[in-house]
Image: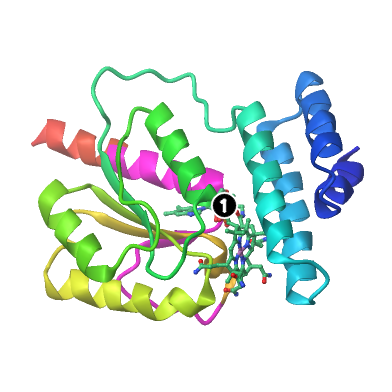
Amino acid sequence: MKEKLIELIANLKLDEAEALADNLIAQGIEAQDLYDIVMEGLNEIGRKYENGECYIADLIVSGMIAKNIFAAANLHQSDKNRSMPLGKVLFGTIYDDIHDIGKDLMIDALENRGIEVIDLGVDVKVDKFVAAVKQHQPDIIAVSCVMTSSIPYLQALGSALENEKLLENRRFLLGGAVVNHDYIKIPQIDFMTNNFYEGIRYCEVFLDEKRERKLNE
Ligand code: B12
């Protein structure tokens, strides 16, 4: 079944892929397993696109399949309910990058865990990030990036945040496929992951600890 679903996604069989995913969800597949399968399918499409075996329209369809399956699986749901926000995360996709599926998935998950999120959208310039940090005073600055061509803007953001002394008592996170590249060196970043679960866990642990520290002051 797993191999079949990867194959259906990689071949952009939208209806069949979604039907099989629904089936797996009904059978109680672990959300993490379903997530891994979808990501494998997307990687296969990405590989095909790189090799000129498919087109931009195919990337769009693959994105739709992923969004629909993640929504059907309620991947972002959590049974935790909080009356007070645990903390504040400022989120955005870096400049010259318009991919937002990963960002939106992370945002849904954070909000469902009682974390307030300010979403700056996609294609966000360094100056806009810096101004938003000053305005909203978030606990965490979270940036999404899948385009390797946007790495220089991530570096510029790191330097700008450091120069403006905006990294004290908060965390700077990077996620998205770009973190797969070993050569990414941005000293100001506290944590990088392209894994949804790791990203959520990191935010929860940091915010919990920060709240504890405040209560003990
Ligand atoms: C769908 C898709 C698109 C869709 C995007 C739709 C949308 N609304 O986002 C469309 C069709 C618009 C698109 C456009 C383009 N794309 Co595109 N696209 C993809 C594809 C197939 C999937 C990306 C995706 O959504 N993945 C699923 C999500 C869930 O994964 P994710 O983003 O990595 O996020 C997860 C984690 O990383 C993490 N996460 C994400 N953000 C954050 C942030 C934090 C803080 C944390 C902790 C975690 C975290 O959580 C998420 C959930 O697990 C990839 C191939 C691939 N396998 O990645 C190519 C890919 C990213 N695209 C690529 C390219 C080249 C383009 C275009 C330039 C094509 C073109 N010629 O126009 C344009 C980009 C224009 C631009 N300036 O941005 C390349 C990038 C190559 C590179 N090395 O930079 C890829 C890798 C394909 C390839 N192999 O060539 N694309």
Q: Quadrant of residue 205?
A: top left
The residue at the far front in this view is: 57
Residue in view at x 61 percent, y 31 percent:
71
Residue in view at x 54 percent, y 43 percent:
197
Q: Relative to 136, is 80 above or below?
A: above
Question: Which image quarter holds the C terminus?
Answer: top left
Residue in view at x 54 percent, y 48 percent:
101
Query: Does mark 1's beta carbon lie closer than 8 Å to ligand 1?
Result: yes
Q: Position of residue 198 (x, y in %)?
A: 51, 48
Q: Position of residue 99 (x, y in %)?
A: 51, 58
Mark 1 burial class by Cα count in 10 Å: few <14, some 14-19, many 20+: some
Q: Relative to 97, is 107 above or below?
A: above
Residue 184 lies in the magenta stretch: yes
Residue in the foreground of this view, choosing between 57 and 116: 57
Residue in view at x 55 percent, y 57 percent:
194
Q: Position of residue 7 (x, y in %)?
A: 88, 50
The magenta stretch is 182-207
The residue at the far left in this view is: 217
| Rendered image coloring scheme | rainbow
Residue in the foreground of this view, choosing between 51 and 30: 51
Question: Which image quarter holds the N terminus?
Answer: top right
Q: Is residue 128 left or right of residue 124?
A: left
Q: Position of residue 77 (x, y in %)?
A: 52, 26
Tell me the amino acid under the disc marked 1.
Asn
Question: Considering the numbered disc 1 on the image, is that residue within a helix, a strand or a loop?
Answer: loop
Residue 24 lies in the magenta stretch: no
Q: Is residue 217 left or right of residue 90?
A: left
Residue annotated with mark 1: 195
Q: Relative to 21, is 134 above or below?
A: below
Q: Quadrant of ligand 1?
A: bottom right
Q: Quadrant of residue 165?
A: bottom left
Please count the marks in the image.
1
